[in-house]
Image (cartoon, rainbow, N blue to C red):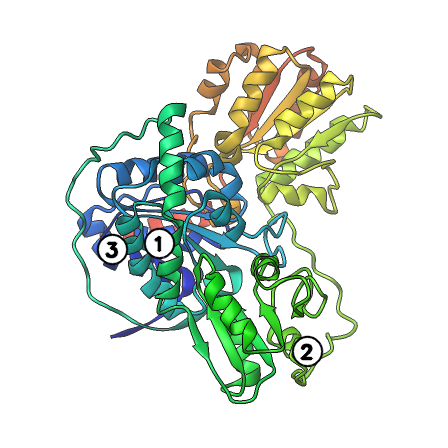
Amino acid sequence: MKRLLLGDEAIALGAIHAGLSGVYAYPGTPSTEITEFIQADATARERGIHSRWCTNEKTAMEAALGMSYAGKRALVCMKHVGMNVCADAFVNSAITGVNGGLIVLAADDPSMHSSQNEQDSRFYGKFALVPIFEPSNQQEAYDMVSSAFALSESLKVPVVLRIVTRLAHSRAAVEIGKLHDENALNPSTDQWVLLPGIARKKYVDLLGKQAEFVKASEASPYNKKETADGQKLGIIACGIGYNYVKENVGDEADILKISQYPLSSKVIRQFADEHESLIVVEDGQPVVEETIAGMVGADYPIKGRLTGDLPRTGELTPDCVAKALGKPAGPVFEPAKNLAGRPPQLCQGCGHRDVYTALNQVLAEYPDYRVFGDIGCYTLGALPPFKALSSCVDMGASITMAKGAADAGLFPAVAIIGDSTFTHSGMTGLLDAVNDKSNITVVISDNLTTGMTGGQDSAGTNKFEAICLGLGVEPEHVRVVVPLPKNMPEITHILKEEIEYNGVSVIIPRRECIQTAARHAREARKAKEANK
């Protein structure tokens, strides 16, 4: 049977069919649809597969590792910057090893469609010294999940599954296999205690497995060589880049397809010996290009992103690959003329709009103010018409950057952070500020959901006042307002009071996201009609 699936959906279905017992994730584009698919799948619900959203990627990684310890198969999903958040647990999981199969899904975002950088998660796989899978299409994405679980269990290590936006969010027909049973509960009898004496031994064990990882790559059905007679140029195509190569050269080129790592120096050197030069086509950073240069020597000609034959930034396209291969590109369409630009904006009626209106009104009285922003749909407050933010660096940075600026003498220092981001990584910064009695004003703009990624549950809903009080914010300086135009006098008065307070204050503007409110209203109407 075939199904038309997004790359994300193919991975999710592949995991269910491979005997998944739990998916752990924090929503982040382009990975979000994996967990959402599992949450909505009938088989997953029938089996009771765990699929509740986690507070952040680190807690997701640790929970998945705990499920693996118990002998079950676990999938942890995140976008590429989430790998930074879970890095401590992820890198150490390679040392502890695994029991039940453990896949770490990293969805990279070349071209930064919805991200603040273009980092390549294959570096994390190399850093942790674990195998990496990189599908070139939706069918491989489905099939690789089963292969990755099997490899993880046979070699007792976590496995990285790396995809990119273009694969995650495109559809293709996928041949579906059969449904397998979950693993039986079988807690590990090994010692996962990383005291230095134990960790040193386990690290030696991990290093000793590297040759097995290479052998697995050499035998992998996802790595293959395609040969056409008389070719001087050898093409090494990684993951989705293989599609762009095939679109341009068909069967008339020598191609070494790489979709499972680590690279085999034997295979690479043999392929290089058969050609006068190589070109490396990979979506992301030049991970393979740099590695191959070390394998074949500095004098061997290699083209790719480092040489400028392929763009150094942005995602690959069939046209840029065609140019690198000396092929004519497809037709170029000029953008329509005389159309006004339409930059992204906060939804009309969004509560964040009223928050920024109030902030701008109050802060206009302070010539040296700065507003430190955070990651979420409210980041759009940096753009016209509000132009309200001075910074937005990473999840949770608003509070700690405001604290540091206040430590330097800046006044007023205001942080604005969303509800989901606050529980993700803002709480510890607030505790630092409380312990230091920092003179900052924190605005937790609470729209009762994780709005930027589609309205998933937010971990701290209806808990924020208690969290702030528990962290030590004075009760009289935890204030809740309803961001509506009619409440503007009250909101601006409270903002002014708390900015003038010499210490940590928290203001929580709370109103449901208009998108989720509309969805909830539709669901309520349908339920009412169904009960008639």
- The amino acid beneath tag 1 is Glu
Point out the tag, 1 or 2, that comes first from the N-terminus.
1
Residue linked to disc 2: 323
Residue linked to disc 1: 212
Point out the tag, 1 or 3, that comes first from the N-terminus.
1
Q: Is residue 201 left or right of residue 349?
A: left
Q: Residues within 10 Å of mark 2 (few under 14, many from 20)?
A: some
Does residue 4 appear anywhere in the picture?
A: yes
Quadrant of the image occupied by residue 194? top left
- Residue 124, x across and y down, in percent: 50, 46
Q: Residue at the spot x=47%, y=65% of the render?
A: 266
For the residues carrying marks 2 and 3, which lies nearer the camera in this image?
2
Does residue 240 appear anywhere in the picture?
A: no
Do the CB atoms of the residues marked 2 and 3 lie less than 8 Å apart? Answer: no
Q: Residue at the spot x=58%, y=69% of the render?
A: 281
Q: Which element is circle 2 on?
A: helix
Q: Is residue 96 above or below residue 29?
A: above
Q: Residue at the spot x=31%, y=50% of the render?
A: 152
- Residue 116, x across and y down, in percent: 63, 47
Residue linked to disc 3: 530
Q: Which element is circle 1 on?
A: helix
